[in-house]
Amino acid sequence: MGVSIRGLMMDRAGSVVRDRFAVVYAPRKKKRLSANCVQIMESERAAREAADPARHRHAALVAGPSTSSESQQLYYLVRWLE
């Protein structure tokens, strides 16, 4: 049985990690996303409108931010919106 994304995230601040709509720069679609590749959007509609797959900018629902064991800020893919 697999481990959930929530089980992998480290949220020392308690309520910081939450689901958010975003546009993600992702030449290759991955599950762990560096914070500098994630642009948080106000709504699902805004994320979908700002997406540009030809430029590797994809609409997504992400969870985060979370701090990795290497002290990097990460978001985790919940699902692609496309």
Image: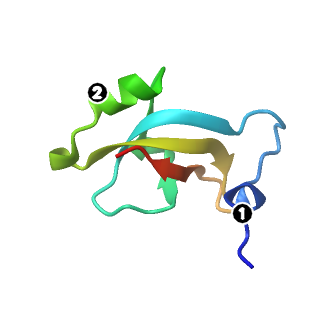
Q: Earlier in the sequence, mark 2 or mark 1?
A: 1
* Quadrant position of the N terminus in the picture: bottom right
Foreground residue among 31 and 70: 31
Q: What element carries label 2?
A: helix
Tell me if mark 1 has few (under 14), some (14-19) or many (20+) residues whose alpha carbon lies within 10 angstroms of its own.
few
Which residue is painted at 53% across and 52% down in the image? 77
Color encoding of the figure: rainbow
Q: Residue type at mark 2?
A: Glu
Q: Which residue is drawn at 63% across and 41% down?
A: 65
In the picture shown, does residue 67 fall above or below 15?
below
What's the residue type where badge 1 is placed? Ser
Q: Which type of secondary structure does the marked residue at label 1 adopt? A: loop
- Residue at image position (77%, 60%) is 7
Q: What residue did someone put label 2 on?
A: 49
State the residue position of label 1: 4
Q: Nearer the viewer, residue 6 or 74?
A: 6
Position of residue 28 measured from the top left corner of the image (x, y, whole percent): 32, 63
Give percent across and percent down for residue 29: 37, 61
